[in-house]
Image: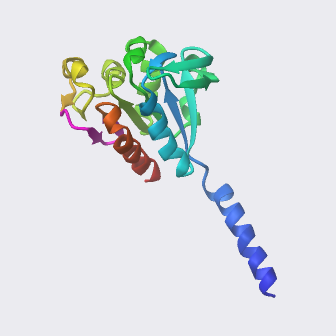
Amino acid sequence: MRLKKFFFFLTLLIFIPILYGKDKKVLMVIAFENFRDEELFTPKNILEKNGIKVDIASVKKGVAKGMLGAKVNVELTIDFTKEDEYDGIIFVGGVGSETLFNNKYALNLANQFYKNKKVVGAICLAPVILANSGILKGKKATCYFSASDILKKNGAIYTGNLVEVDENIVTGNGPFAAEKFGIEILKLLKK
């Protein structure tokens, strides 16, 4: 009898998540060259350790290279990525992220995720993408200090803090913020 109860509860543990909740999934967008390594891997590891699936996208497929030498295989391109497949999006910084500042696909993704009340994150220089998309207007935000004027020009309330959370938007100011940035995104995804 105890064995039957055990298998019953084991079956519930397996099937309840399938029936009543889908796994969370996040898209991380990186520059194909010169993304900031720890701004990709630190939040990615935090999310994955907490059961969140992470996909990586860029402007093209292949092996992308980080500023500190990390390499990551990119299997998705931002021009064919669909917002409805994800619960959140993170734009990774580094000097290469400048190539995404005015990329129409990156700007559109930021707008779509925000409009649908999903988690939107950007760190280091990447908050410029959010500012250029228009979603930071009237929002508290932070970024790498050299890009603060762009945020202000686009109507953001620049704080200079390590990490800033305003509604469903999380911004971080650079590599030292990567861990706190990842934790804040995780908190929003768990709500």
Colour mapping: rainbow
Residue at point 68% right, 66% down? Answer: 13
Rendering quarter of residue 17: bottom right
Q: In the displayed structure, does residue 12 sit left or right of residue 144? A: right
Please state which of residues 189 and 93 is positioned toward the viewer in this rendering: 93
Q: Is residue 164 magenta?
A: yes
Residue 108, position as x, y percentages in the image: 45, 20
**Residue 123 in the image, given as x and y percentages of width and height:** 35, 30
- Residue at left 44%, top 20%? 67
* Residue nearer the viewer, 64 or 24: 64
Residue positioned 45% across, 47% down in the render? 189
Indicate whether 162 appears above or below 130: below
Q: Nearer the viewer, residue 183 or 38?
A: 38
Query: Looking at this rendering, what residue extends furthest in the bottom direction?
Result: 1
> How many numbered markers are drawn?
0
**Residue 186 at x, y = what percent?**
44, 48
Query: Is residue 154 shown to the viewer in this render?
Result: no
Residue 37 quadrant? top left
* Residue 162 visible in rendering: yes
Q: Is residue 67 left or right of residue 57?
A: left
Q: Is residue 114 left or right of residue 14?
A: left
Quarter placement of the N terminus? bottom right
In this picture, is 67 found above or below 22?
Answer: above
Q: Residue at x 42, y 32 (%)?
A: 39
Q: Which residues are magenta?
A: 159-171
Inspect the magenta stretch and tell me whether residue 53 lies in it.
Answer: no
Q: Position of residue 74 (x, y in %)?
A: 61, 23
